[in-house]
Image: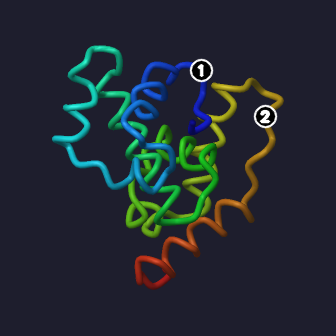
Amino acid sequence: MLKLPAHFRSEALRLSAAGIDDWPAIAALSDAQLRGLAASGSASEQRLRRLRGQARLVVELELAPAEAALLLHGGIATGQALAEATPERLLVQLGRLERSLLGQGATGLTRATVLGWIQRARRITGRPGN
């Protein structure tokens, strides 16, 4: 079974029961398939959509699931959106989010990390740098 945060327990169980056990499989789900998975009532369609968005970032940009989740929660839902971001603005935006979630001691995000994500997104989406 795919390792997901505890608050996605119901969704993880439903995905596993449907034989969906990796990020590419989640990324490939259609809206109709998400509705079908949620129809049982044990999984939330909204949470499944969030997982699909995270999965698409993981697959498209080869990000770690936690990195994709941070970007998604920070308002970056696609590789194109990441490719259009500036490192300075994204670092401020995600740094603020990271601190609100993890407290003032959160220091995992660096300019080099954010710049690496943006450069990878630009290379994959074919968008030239600023």
- Which quadrant holds residue 44? top left
* Mark pair 1, 2: CA separation: 21 Å
Q: Position of residue 38 (x, y in %)?
A: 26, 25
Q: As rendered, which of 122 and 41 lies closer to the eye?
A: 41
State the residue lying farthest toward the left: 32
For residue 98, side relative to residue 118 (left or right)? right
Residue 53 against residue 43 in the figure, above or below: below
* Amino acid of disc 1: Ala
Circle number at residue 106: 2
| Mark 2 secondary-structure assignment | loop
| Mark 1 secondary-structure assignment | helix
Residue under the point 58% across and 75% down: 119
Circle number at residue 31: none
Quadrant where the N terminus is found in the figure:
top right
Residue 67 against residue 62 in the figure, above or below: above
Count of numbered badges drawn on the protein: 2
The tag earlier along the polypeptide, 1 or 2, is 1
Residue 71 against residue 63 in the figure, above or below: above
Q: Position of residue 77 (x, y in %)?
A: 40, 51
Residue under the point 45% across and 57% down: 24
* Amino acid of disc 2: Ala
Q: Residues within 10 Å of mark 2 (few under 14, many from 20)?
A: some
Q: Position of residue 14 (x, y in %)?
A: 40, 27
For residue 20, side relative to residue 42 (left or right)? right
| Label 1 with label 2: CB-CB less than 8 Å | no
For residue 36, side relative to residue 29 (left or right)? left
Q: Nearer the viewer, mark 1 or mark 2?
A: 1
Q: Position of residue 60 (x, y in %)?
A: 46, 65
Residue under the point 55% across and 49% down: 68
Residue under the point 31% across and 28% down: 46
Circle number at residue 6: 1
Q: As rendered, which of 25 and 49 lies closer to the eye?
A: 25
